[in-house]
Image (cartoon, rainbow, N blue to C red):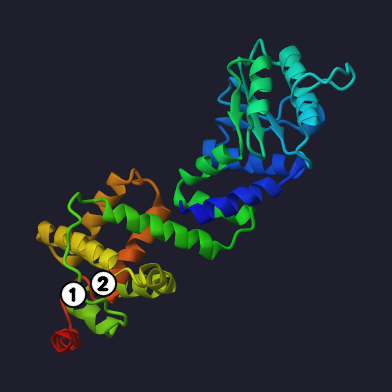
Amino acid sequence: MESTTRDIIKERIRSKKEIHFQGFVNFLYTKCYGSTRFTTIKQKRDGGSDGVLDGNTILAVYGPNQLDLNKFKKKLGKSGNAKEPGDFEKYEKNFSDKYPNWQVVYNNEMTTSRVEYLRELKSDVILVGVDDLVELISVQNYADIEAIGKWLEIKNSLISNDLLYEVVIGMLRLEEDTSVQISSFIESAIDPQEKIEINFSGEEIDRVTEELIDGMKYFGALDTMFKGKSDKVNILKKKVRDALEDYNDTLYNSLKKYEKRAAETSNKTSDDKYKYYLRCVLLYLFERCYIGKKTLAEKKKNALSK
């Protein structure tokens, strides 16, 4: 995930306070761990628990309006008030026998003073600050990352463009050899329908046409991503083109094989959204005339550019 996107997600998490932060953590943990691993607790009778993870960990979720260390200690630790005990006091009284782990989830950075205080309470406390939450989000499948971004009210185009970039970076890493001769960057596309018809046959034509039309909404973002980076474009197209040629099969079958390999290499075999974005990038390379048999117009254009 790009640093800019990480920073935006981080700030949106920080902006969630009190019950809104609790609601976000409930949504996030349910997405990340599923309802079988994570269980929420009704707030009026939580007994000091903001959720149970993996049947052995009690959560204490804290999203204060102000970054006050003393309030942090009173809320999460020992309040000094028997009528309003801190979360750790309630954990010790109500849950520690059955649930050996205690996890604190905080909507900001876990500063040294906060870490030291919590570890004085329980040496093996599990600490989850805002950076940890961002990291947790970044390793989810693409559909869940988009859903989390939507919950945080982040523009979908920002998330989708970031995921497209991640797909491209993954494609660039598929091969070790990144040496390539820089050539011209084709800015405009040739008639895609003609190119489809000379590269595919039968039902493939309708299927690829439909996928291409759907994927075109991301082509502008990919153009922007590659603008002024012809070296990256050429490395990418060489890697993809060489891989497709190695399969020694029809273009349609070769693309399927490439997609399967890329998904396996990226540990995304069960991530349908990743596969969708990967397909969009491959169709972009096809439509921008980097892979596949060339049309007559392409051949003429390339001849004139030499």
Dot 1 amino acid type: Asn
Residue 289, by quadrant, is: bottom left
Q: Residue furthest top?
A: 97
For the residue pair 306 and 168, the one nearer the viewer reads as 306
Q: Which residue is mark 1?
A: 199
Which residue appears at 22% of the width and 77% of the height? Answer: 184
Element type at mark 2: helix
Q: Is residue 276 above or below residue 131?
A: below
Q: Earlier in the sequence, mark 1 or mark 2?
A: 1
Element type at mark 1: helix
Residue 8, by quadrant, is: bottom right
Number of callouts: 2
For the residue pair 121 and 149, the one nearer the viewer reads as 121
Which residue appears at 58% of the width and 24% of the height? Answer: 126
Quarter the C terminus occupies: bottom left
Let me know if residue 61 appears in the view. yes
* Structural crowding at the residue carrying mark 2, measured as other residues with C-alpha within 10 Å and reported as few (<14), some (14–19) or many (≥20): many
Mark 1 vs mark 2, CA separation in Å: 10 Å
Circle 1 or circle 2, nearest the eye? 2
Q: Is residue 297 above or below residue 219?
A: below
Q: Which mark is residue 286?
A: 2
Residue 127, by quadrant, is: top right
Dot 2 amino acid type: Phe
Residue 267: give x, y in percent of width and height.
34, 43
Q: Is residue 11 left or right of residue 146?
A: right
Mark 1 touches mark 2? (CB < 8 Å): yes
Which residue appears at 73% of the width and 19% of the height? Answer: 88
Q: Is residue 292 left or right of residue 161?
A: left
For the residue pair 203 and 305, the one nearer the viewer reads as 305
Residue 282: give x, y in percent of width and height.
29, 65
Let me know if residue 59 appears in the view. no
Residue 99: give x, y in percent of width and height.
63, 16
